[in-house]
Structure formats: C-alpha cells, structure tokens
C-alpha cells in the first residue's frame, strides 16, 4: 500500500494539472481569452438554451425529388439512345404526370430501345424491385414511371445529402457548434447558438444553389417572351436584372455546364469595384467551358441560379483558364452568401422554413445563473457531508470532487464540447455521484478496522476490495450513457456527454488521486489511529 512510486505520483499530478489548466479559459470572460492564441484558450461552447440563438425547422419538398429524377432520366435516355449502334431515333418526349414517355420512330428498333431504357434502371435494396417501371403503350411509345420504392430510396439519399449541405453552409458562417438533425422523413432541425437574427440564415438555407450555364436562344421573339411561350428546345426563365428591361429571357434547355463542376467560389470585385462572385471549375469543367466558349464566341450565354437568370453576357473570346465570374445586382453580403452556397454544393431537394424561433441571450444568461447556483449548492452540500462524516478521509474526497469539477470542464473544452441546460443537470449529477466511490472505500476501511486489521492493511484492503464494486457500478452507468449518446439527440446527447466524461474523471480522481493523498499522509505521519 505504501509502495506508491514517484513516477505514478508525477503522472497523476501532471494529468490533473493539465485538466485544470484546460478548464481555466472557459471560466474567464471571452474578452480576455480572445487575445490569447487559440491553442492556449480552448473554451466550452454554450448550447442554444444557454447562449441564445436561432431555431429553424426546415421541410423538404419531396415532390421536387420526383421532378428532378424525371428530368435527369430524360437526359440519360437521350444520351443512351444516341450512343446506340446504330443510333435509335426518338421523339415526342413528354414528362407529364411524373412519368417519362417517348416515341420510337423506327418500330423495328422498339425492342432495342426498351432494352436500353431498362439498362438505365437500378435495383432498390435487396427487395428485387426496380426504381423505374418500363412499359410499351400504343405499340411505339415507351413509358418510364418511377416506382414508390425508387422514390423513397432517392428521397432518403437526397435528405442525407441536404443535411450535409446545410451543415457545410452553416459552418461557413463561422458559427459555433450548430445542432443539425434529421427529423422524420422530410424535416431538418437547425439550431445555431449565438445567432439571434435568423434572416440571413433563412435566405442561405432556402437557396438551392443550382447553378447552370445555358446558351441564350436568340430566335425567341418579343411576342413569345411576353406570352411566356418558348421555341422548341428552349425555355423561358425570369431575368430580373435584364439590362434590356424585359424581365424574361429564352435559353436552351440543355445546360452546357453546371455548378457540380465547381471547385471554388469566392466573393470579389470587378474592375469597377462592384461585388462579384469568382468561380473556378475542376479540370473536366474547365475543358467544357473552354470548348463551349470557343464554339460560341460572339453569342450570349446565361448564368442561371435556381432557375432565375443572374446575368447573360456575350462570349467575347474563348475562356481557357477554367475560371469565370458571376456579376449581377449584388451587395457584398449577397455575393458572399452566393459564394458560400456554391462552395457547399447545391441542395438536392428544395427546403422551406416551416417553423422558426429565437432564444434571447437574456434567457440564456438566466439559465446559466440558475445552473451555476444549483451546481454551487450541490457541491457545497456534498463537501460538507463528506467532511462531517469521514473527517480527514472526507477532506481528501472533497479535494477529489473539486479537482474533478475542473477536469470535467477541461476535457469538455479540449473536445470542443457544447454545454446545454441538460448538460448542467448531468454535471450536478456527476458531482453527487463522484463521492460514491469514496463512500464505498471509506466504509470498507471502517469495516476492516472493526475486524482488527492494522491501519495500513485496512486502507489497502479498503481500496482494493471497493475498486471492483466501483468499476462494475460505473460500467453500468457508462453503458446507459453510451446508449443515450448514440441513440439520443439534442439535449439528451448533451446530458450523455457530460455524464460519460464525469464517470471517467470521477473514477480517476476518487480512486487514484485520493489513494495518492492517503499514501502520502501515511508515509509522513505514520499514525497509530485514524478517525473515519
């Protein structure tokens, strides 16, 4: 028992000292720690209920997925029929009623066209179902209809991707520890601490950021634009900032380039110091852009964002560097938001805000104050009880509790954890549970003394025998906390994180740290009796 090597004393002391030092920045005002290097000032982030902030609930337009799938399938069918050897001529393509239908001009090639169409479908999971049904009607028309299983699978993928895109966009704003969670099949919950005005956030998250480049159809007449009737192979899109004054423009349906081939987007300024967005394409996109600008020099092309034309400049010369700029009626903020949206990728599904709320910083301050008061009262009550019940050994246990509080804060700061109101509840619970181990140890020492064992033997057996029970009890707590962490969300996760950290640190301080203190005292004083 008295054989407690120096290396062990140093390692325990150093570990606890590091934990305490990591906790200090979180206890100081931000105006003080903001001047420190970031690696010297790790801080605990405060959740929405403590720091205030914005709460948004986004709902996805699942019909948008079906519409996009039909449009994508139309392009795939055109390409597949064109690549057939020999090419299969099709026409009268329709995307009405959520299905794709087309006419095969040569009846002799109908079976080949059906095989090509079926090759574009995929199995859904392990059910054996396909994501599209392919049928022949009226002898020469092929109809492709998306199946329910295919739509459900595609919607699930779109929602997963949309959640990640939302996360990237919020991270680009520089906010701390946002909460972004899927709710049900078609909703995403967003909570951003510290952001009290959600207007800019709503605009950013509601923007699909589908960027396309299409050639302008110069054959469209003023009358066609006024009646919103496009020539065959073209479409009419809104153009709010059209220098010609007409709020519409005709563009080719086929996109020559899309935002999927972007690798970078940044806010900048043009030669007249007006805000623009500078974009850079990947290697494939750069080659496409160079080829298109070479083939269409002197013609206008439209930059389209979410089916609205931003600008439609002329291609004065081939653009070979793989870079371009988007100009329009931008402010610095709107250009920066567009750059963020483009960098984070387009949303695969349209989102709309169906619920929003704001937690004021004042309410958060009240929650922190109440949590601090509860923590102080709980700590003082526990310390008083232990000191009165176990004397010197209670004092050692109290030292472990105080150190444990700092170490918990230090570990949370190190992992950039977020403290919420339920997390404070877990913190208080941990303080109370932290002395459980010392109660077990001290009661075991009492029992051994009553059996007539010596002081050293009693202390040694007290720690040895109680450690097994302490370990088993905390393993069960840790299992419960781990389940809450893995399966819970939001406040439940916040509670679980603090609980799990507290379990680990309380065992360390209650067993190893107090044993170190007791051994040091026994070596120095060699007491003939102990009061416990």
Image (cartoon, grey):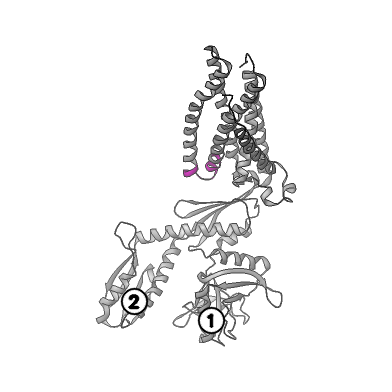
**Element under label 1?**
helix
In the rendered view, tell whether residue 520 sits above or below residue 87. Answer: above
Indicate left or right for 8 with 118 as reference.
Answer: right
Q: Position of residue 237 (x, y in %)?
A: 53, 76
Q: What residue range appears in magenta?
A: 485-495
Question: Is 439 a magenta residue?
Answer: no
**Element under label 2?**
strand
Q: Position of residue 308 (x, y in %)?
A: 55, 72
Dot placed on the residue nearer the N-terminal end, 2 or 1: 2
- Residue 97 found in image quarter: bottom left
**Residue located 42% across and 70% down the image:** 72
Return the residue at label 2. Answer: 102
Calculate the distance from the C-alpha at mark 2 to the C-alpha at mark 1: 33 Å
Q: Position of residue 66 (x, y in %)?
A: 41, 65
In the rendered view, tell whether residue 227 sits above or below residue 99. Answer: below
Q: Position of residue 399 (x, y in %)?
A: 65, 28
- Residue 139 visible, this orientation: no
Q: Nearer the viewer, residue 435 or 486?
A: 435
Indicate left or right for 158 with 290 as reference.
Answer: left
Return the residue at label 1. Answer: 290
């Amino acid at each position: 028992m008295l054989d407690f090597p120096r290396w062990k004393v140093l390692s325990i002391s150093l570990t606890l000292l590091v934990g305490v030092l990591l906790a200090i920045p979180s206890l100081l005002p931000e105006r003080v720690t903001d001047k420190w290097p970031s690696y010297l000032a790790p801080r605990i982030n405060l959740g929405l209920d403590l720091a205030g902030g914005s709460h948004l609930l986004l709902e996805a337009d699942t019909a948008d997925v079906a519409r996009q799938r039909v449009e994508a399938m139309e392009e795939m069918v055109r390409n597949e029929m064109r690549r057939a050897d020999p090419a299969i001529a099709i026409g009268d393509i329709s995307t009405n009623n959520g299905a794709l239908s087309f006419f095969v001009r040569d009846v002799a090639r109908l079976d080949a066209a059906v095989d090509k169409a079926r090759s574009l479908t995929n199995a859904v999971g392990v059910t054996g179902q396909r994501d599209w049904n392919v049928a022949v009607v009226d002898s020469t028309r092929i109809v492709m209809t998306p199946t329910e299983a295919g739509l459900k699978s595609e919607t699930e993928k779109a929602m997963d991707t949309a959640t990640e895109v939302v996360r990237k966009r919020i991270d680009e704003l520089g906010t701390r520890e946002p909460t972004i969670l899927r709710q049900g099949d078609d909703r995403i919950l967003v909570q951003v601490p510290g952001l009290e005005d959600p207007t800019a956030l709503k605009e950013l998250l509601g923007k699909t950021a589908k960027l396309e480049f299409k050639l302008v159809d110069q054959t469209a007449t003023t009358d066609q634009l006024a009646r919103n009737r496009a020539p065959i192979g073209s479409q009419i899109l809104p153009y709010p900032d059209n220098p010609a004054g007409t709020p519409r423009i005709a563009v080719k349906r086929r996109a020559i380039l899309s935002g999927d081939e972007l690798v970078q987007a940044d806010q900048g300024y043009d030669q007249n110091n007006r805000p623009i967005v500078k974009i850079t394409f990947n290697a494939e996109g750069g080659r496409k852009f160079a080829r298109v600008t070479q083939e269409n020099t002197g013609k206008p092309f439209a930059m389209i964002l979410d089916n609205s034309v931003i600008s439609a400049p002329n291609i004065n010369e081939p653009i070979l560097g793989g870079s371009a700029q988007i100009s329009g009626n931008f402010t610095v903020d709107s250009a920066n938001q567009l750059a963020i949206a483009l960098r984070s990728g387009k949303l695969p599904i349209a989102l709309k805000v169906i619920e929003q709320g704001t937690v004021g910083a004042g309410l958060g301050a009240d929650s922190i104050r109440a949590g601090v008061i509860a923590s102080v009262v709980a700590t003082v009550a526990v310390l008083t009880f232990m000191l009165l019940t176990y004397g010197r050994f209670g004092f050692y246990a109290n030292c472990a509790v105080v150190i444990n509080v700092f170490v918990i804060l230090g570990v949370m700061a190190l992992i950039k954890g977020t403290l919420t109101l339920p997390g404070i509840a877990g913190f208080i619970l941990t303080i109370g549970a932290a002395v459980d181990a010392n109660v077990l140890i001290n009661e075991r020492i009492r029992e051994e003394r009553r059996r007539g064992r010596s002081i050293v033997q009693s202390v040694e057996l007290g720690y040895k025998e109680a450690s097994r029970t302490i370990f088993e009890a905390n393993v069960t707590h840790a299992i419960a906390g781990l389940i809450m962490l893995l399966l819970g969300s939001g406040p439940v996760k916040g509670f679980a994180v603090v609980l799990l950290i507290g379990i680990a640190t309380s065992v360390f301080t209650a067993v190893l740290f107090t044993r170190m203190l007791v051994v040091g005292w026994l070596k120095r004083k060699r007491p003939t009796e102990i009061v416990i």
